[in-house]
Amino acid sequence: MSHVWYVSYGSNLHAARFACYLAGGTPGGAARGYPGCRDRSPPRAVRGLGVPGGIYFATHSPVWGGGRAFYDPDLPGTAAVRGYLVTAAQFSDVVEQEMYREPGPEIDLAAVLAHGREQRGPGRYDTLLHLGDVDGCPALTFTAPWTSAEVEHTAPSGPYLKVLRDGLCEAHPWTTARAAAYLAKRTPFWTGPEIEGL
């Protein structure tokens, strides 16, 4: 297996932000930079997708100053996501950077592909999920080991929601109002008009 779809549901919905994970750099509005992948090639393909489940916001991000997005496949509905066709090694390096670790040896994806889920550790993005295949390549994402019901939901920051909103508009494409309404349904701390006005 040479390529996988990295399925993003958070700030990497925004292509310019995800480019910093591939090539290195500090995304606009973020408080820290990223070293980038060992292979800095752009994705072979990019597309908007929908997957069963939903997103919610929890914990506190030192990068954004508020709650982070997490994906729970057992929530009702459909999560609007963006797929990036990258190498398996690039996906590994993205996982490491999300955990504030340096890119290193390639992650063995055999377990997640065989079982649909692999908890690599207790970290907030250390649980890998296989969401099926797209055009013959596995669609993979990462999330927390807990479920939406097992953690306190926290308020995402305005700059973070703006990146998600704009990424949704890029990926599908949606109007700003539609993307804002989608996000508002997933957090009790913001209204659709507030998110639209960011």
Image: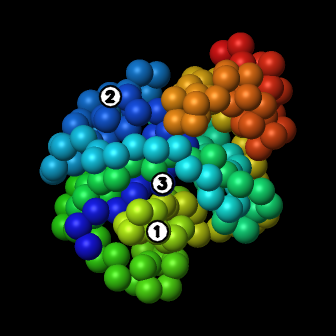
- Label 1 neighbour load within 10 Å: few <14, some 14-19, many 20+: few
Q: Position of residue 96 (x, y in %)?
A: 33, 57
Q: Is residue 27 visible?
A: yes
Residue at 63%, 46% in the rendered image = 80
Disc 2 crowd rating (10 Å Cα; few below 14, some 14-19, many 20+) is some
Disc 2 + disc 1, Cβ < 8 Å: no
Choose between 134 and 5: the one closer to the eye.
134
Please tell me whether residue 192 is drawn above or below residue 142 in the rendered image.
above
> Considering the numbered disc 1 on the image, is that residue within a helix, a strand or a loop?
strand
Q: Which residue is mark 3?
A: 7
Q: On the image, numbered disc 2 is attached to which residue?
A: 26
Q: Quadrant of residue 16?
A: top left
Give the mark toward the camera: 1 or 3.
1
Residue 132 location (% of width, % of height)? 51, 70
Which residue reaches farthest top?
197
> Which numbered disc, 2 or 3, marks the residue that appears first in the sequence?
3
Is 108 positioned to the left or the right of 46 in the image? left
Let me know if residue 31 appears in the view.
Answer: no
Q: Identity of the amino acid at label 1?
A: Asp
- Residue lying at the far front of the rendered structure: 135
Badge 3 crowding class, 10 Å Cα cut-off, few under 14, some 14 to 19, many 20 or more, is many
Residue 65: quadrant of the picture: top right
Mark sitting on residue 133: 1
Task: Tell me what residue is drawn at x 39 percent, y 48 percent.
Answer: 84
